[in-house]
Amino acid sequence: MIENRRILLVVSGGIAAYKSLDLARELRRHGATVRAILTEAGARFVTPLSLAALTGDKVYGDLFSLTDESEMGHIRLSREADLVLVAPATADILAKMAHGLATDLATTALLATDKPVMVAPAMNVRMWEHAATRANMATLAARDVTVIAPAVGEMACGEEGEGRLADVSDIVAAVEDFFDTAAALGAANPTEGGSAAAPLRGRRAVVTSGPTHEPLDPVRFIGNRSSGKQGHAIAAALARLGADTVLVSGPVALPDPVGVSVVHAETAEDMLRAVSARLPVDVAVMAAAVGDWRAREVASHKIKKRTDRTPPRIELAENPDILAAVAAAGNKRPRLVIGFAAETEDVIAQGRAKRAAKGCDWIVANDVSPGTSVFGGDENTVHLIRGADEDQTESWPRLSKDAVAARLADAVARHFAAVP
């Protein structure tokens, strides 16, 4: 809950700045008190008057205002908030934050704050993927800055990819999740100190993601449609909460998540070896769509069409079951093992059956039937199954995969808070 929470909203200068107006309105609708800092560039996209009308408070922007700075306004602004939220966060302001620059009121307040900081990046896809931005994001993640990952889609510049500002509803959900996690951890004041911002600090996590490719010959393979978006988002979410996270990724077309150690694997056997080498850990999230079958023998040369046009006979062998293996790892078993069940019918029932069969603690069951757009898409509808009883199943609404990841990471944090 964000009711009665004080949020300092920093609006920097990008085309997505217009969404800050809706964000301010939604935060207030949820009961938060919102005060805003508008950068000089941000004021090129939205006016102070518009932002003031929606926050119900004065909008700040001038570092050298005699009235405000006679009271050390940048210190007061940054210290009176429960959370500092930068949305949109441009490449420029993220770089200044990473390098400790204080060139205006916004960056000075960010450098002076002792409160948790959350950023929602928004920029061109090439800027987001640039090595400098990735390094800056890694620096901020190491300082416990919470990152609301940008969305994928068409941008104002006409290009398409990752870099769009997250939906306003997802940003509000991330703010709610932050305060809910802090409350669940029993913090009397969740904004003091770093424990609430990083409740999984000191914990170790391993996450699998994406498909596996099982070769038939040097050019062909057996695979599936998994994009890896959900697993990558989960690894990033655990890292943002402070966990030392290793992501074992199958072949995907995604950048490595910020603040996460990544091991690339191709086959199920590769993935099992990589996961086993990282055990024991506190939590394992097996989100990869691991192929059930592989060719018993891989051809050393490309399989050619036969002159009689009859298809080749390919004998299959069963792949190792990574989730079951991790759940049965003896003294190396993670304290919390979470599996995924991608189903096309009877999703909850199938998920419960899989949880029992694999021996894991939790199952995240989702519907991947045609028309759901889960494989390869940016949204997911999941059911978190903790046990066999109905009251041990949480059915979440359709959310972005980043929001699903944030909720799951928060559930993990609450679990370890209750069972140290």
Image (cartoon, grey):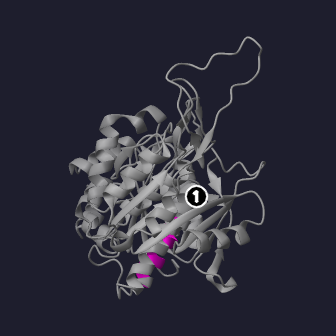
**Residue 173 in the image, given as x and y percentages of width and height:** 55, 67
Which residue does the image show at 73% across and 24% down from the upper left?
311
Which residue does the image show at 57% across and 34% down from the upper left?
156
**371 is within the stretch colored magenta:** no
Tell me the residue that label 1 is attached to. Answer: 168
Q: Main secondary structure of the magenta part?
A: helix
Q: Nearer the viewer, residue 368 or 292?
A: 292
**178 is within the stretch colored magenta:** yes
Q: Nearer the viewer, residue 295 or 403?
A: 295
Q: Secondary structure at mark 1?
A: helix
User: Does residue 385 appear left or right of residue 310 in this picture?
Assistant: left
Res 306 quadrant in image: top right
Residue 288's place in the image compared with 348, above or below, is above
User: Does residue 137 appear left or right of residue 300 in this picture?
Assistant: left
Q: Which amino acid type is shown beneath numbered disc 1?
A: Val
**Residue 161 in the image, given as x and y percentages of width and height:** 54, 36
Chain part drawn in magenta:
174-183
Q: Nearer the viewer, residue 42 or 312?
A: 312
